[in-house]
Structures are given as C-alpha cells and as structure tokens.
Amino acid sequence: MRKFLIAALLAVASFGAGLNFKSLQSDFTQIVFSEGSSVTYKGRFYAKNDNTALWIYESPTPKRIYFDKQRVVVIEDELEQAIISRLDDTPNLTQILAHAEQIQPTLYKAIYDGVDYLITMKNGLPVMIDYKDKLSNKIKITLNNTLKDAIIPQETLTPVIPQGYDIVNQ
C-alpha cells in the first residue's frame, strides 16, 4: 500500500508539465514495475492548479484517492474503509511546471524532490509520464482523452467518507 501511495503521489506532481493550466483531467493507465513484476492500474484523474487532485481507480481494485495540501484520503469501498494520511511535503504542481524543461520537441523533463520525470507531449497535452520513484519502482502513466482547463467542481475533489466505514489515520 505504501508503494502504491507514493507512486500515486509522485504522479500527481508530474501532471501538466510544459502547460499552464487551471485544471487537467484524463483517463489513465498506470503501470508500476517492481522487482521483476508489474501491476497495471486504470482509471480517471482530475487535478486543479491549487494542488487538489482525485484519482479514481477502476481496476484492478476500485478505489478513490484524494489529494490536497495537507493530506491524502484513500477510500476503498470493497473494504469499507478510508485511510487518511498527513502530507508533510506535498508536490507542488506549479513548481514542477515552472521547472519543466523541453529537452526534445515533444519531451520535457521535470525534477522534483530528487525524482526525474520525463513527460511526453502531443498537441500541447501530456500523453505519457515516465519516472523511477524513490523505492526504485519504474512508473509509466499513459493518458487518454485529456482535457485542459475544464471546470472541475470542488465537490468532485472533496472526499466524502460513507457512514459506517472504518477510518484509519496514519
């Protein structure tokens, strides 16, 4: 679970490289390669430039991961639980955008907290993000149906923990 959260958190930091955006949303496929095996996740991603984001994982296990400046909330309906973790150092989208540098016509590189992100762009939008996290996992995120600057209601990015769910604070 810790590897999963770190991979998701670091991926949040990389969205939108080379772009100035108010919001970004996309379908995604995220492959995490670790110790000779891989896991593929699929879902939808929403982010606003105020460092709030939501990952909706549809497979292999449904879950929703909400990010804001102070915490991460993971809601797992199959387990009827919510895990709330404090964040001491949330990746700042605007910092990553400001420091992303074009290294080839469609390739950008951003460095955040010692992690190198390679962002492939097409038609001004990110289509692929590759990086190796601090746990030596290789992560590849492919984006499809990406929308820039669409209105994302704040309610979409605000976690609502269903009544009766176990709440785990970490």
Image (cartoon, rainbow, N blue to C red):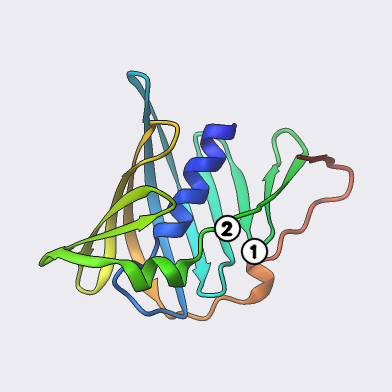
Report x, y in % for residue 49: 51, 75
Q: Which residue is drawn at 50% across and 46% down?
A: 8
Q: Which residue is drawn at 44% across and 52% down?
A: 113
Tell me: 164 left or right of 75. right
Which is nearer the eye, 111 or 84?
111
| Amino acid carrying mark 2 in the image | Thr
Q: Name the residue under label 1.
A: 69
Tell me: 50 left or right of 32. right
Instruction: Answer few, some or many: residues within 10 Å of disc 2's Cα (few below 14, many 20 plus, some between 14 and 19).
Output: some
Mark seen at residue 90: 2
Is tag 1's residue or tag 2's residue first in the polypeptide sequence?
Answer: 1
Q: Which residue is drawn at 89% across and 43% down?
A: 164
Quadrant location of the C terminus? top right
Instruction: Answer few, some or many: residues within 10 Å of disc 1's Cα (few below 14, many 20 plus, some between 14 and 19).
Output: some
| Amino acid carrying mark 1 in the image | Lys
Report x, y in % for residue 109: 25, 59
Report x, y in % for residue 59: 49, 39
Tell me: 85 left or right of 103. right
Residue at the extreme left: 105
Mark seen at residue 108: none
Mark 1 touches mark 2? (CB < 8 Å): yes
Report x, y in % for residue 67: 62, 58
Quadrant location of the N terminus? top right
Label 1, secondary structure: give it. Answer: loop
Tell me: 32 left or right of 6. left
Query: Where is 155 relative to 43, above or below?
Result: below
- Distance between the alpha carbons at the discs numbered 1 and 2: 6 Å
